[in-house]
Amino acid sequence: MGKFSQRLQKKVMTRGKTHGYCTICREYGKLTREHVVPQGCGNIEDKVIVRVTEYLDAPDKPKGNRSQGGIHFRTVCAKCNSLLGSKYDRELINFSNDIAKHLNHLTFGHVFNKITYRPYRTLKLAKAVVGHLLAANSVEETNSDKPLSNRYSMLSEFVLNEAAPLPEGFDIYYWLYPYKPIKMLRSIGSMNIINPSFRVAGDILKYYPIAFLVSYNSKPAPEYGLTKLNLPSTQKINDTAGVEVSYMRALRSDFPERPEDYEVLLMNDEVCTVAV
């Protein structure tokens, strides 16, 4: 118990050595700051970053590592940083800002559509989401040349190869997230202990106004109402596909990292963080 308590008291480190192994391509070199999520998605304010476990215990008084000018991780090389910024991030920014504008219409009493359906370059959108999740890693990973696991290796190749489709077995889901905390949850699983099955499993990125789940060989429980991102198998990088967003309801802000009755949560505390 003592060692566990000591580990929780350690600050989350987002900046390690200036040189190391990139968490996306795994090549050794100078590391750069990667904003998770892009600054264009509103990630520009000073934040305090803590572990999910700490935040769930004391959401009003987190004591963590202060990050100025938004949340950023010094975990990726300049080449991968540039790839995300120049090739993919603009689609994620456009998608996020469109949803935010629509939510603002509701706040100020303007005409409000309960559901929108618009075309986006969803392959670029998917690569941006995956790339930022790969960047939101422990700085300890930059100190070792250990190769990525098979799952993350496939996701890395998906980001690095502009023409690559989402690998077989992976799906990306999204849902409305009208809350301020930015949450990065890697390798997380919520399981029902009465009927043993994963309710939600994969990697999650949440920020105002949207949340994403990158799942592998699993589907979220249907009652959550998550929407699967439209990624046609023949889609090219600049092709568009229709994306539906429902504004009818929002899941609780701590879904799925706070287990409900008869649920258990499986996660790696080192790579599940919250910025507030």
Image (tube, grey):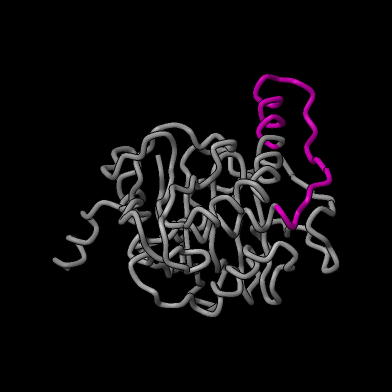
The quarter of the picture where the N terminus appears is bottom left
Camera-side residue of 266 and 132: 132
**Residue 138 screen position, x and y as percent:** 37, 61
Residue at (44%, 31%) from the top-left corner?
A: 45
Residue 119 highlighted magenta (yes or no): yes
**Residue 111 screen position, x and y as percent:** 79, 23
Outermost residue to the left: 2
Camera-side residue of 192 and 40: 40
Query: Is residue 25 depicted above or below 237 in this figure?
Result: below
Camera-side residue of 160 and 120: 160
Residue at (42%, 66%) from the top-left corner?
A: 28
**Residue 244 screen position, x and y as percent:** 79, 48
Residue at (45%, 61%) from the top-left corner?
A: 259
Number of marks in the image?
0
Residue at (44%, 50%) from the top-left corner?
A: 32
Outermost residue to the front: 29
For this view, does 254 lie left or right of residue 251?
left
Residue 91 highlighted magenta (yes or no): no
The quarter of the picture where the C terminus appears is top left
For this view, does 156 lie left or right of residue 231?
left
**Residue 199 screen position, x and y as percent:** 57, 68
For this view, does 201 lie left or right of residue 219?
left
Camera-side residue of 65 and 262: 65
Which residues fall within the magenta stretch? Answer: 99-124
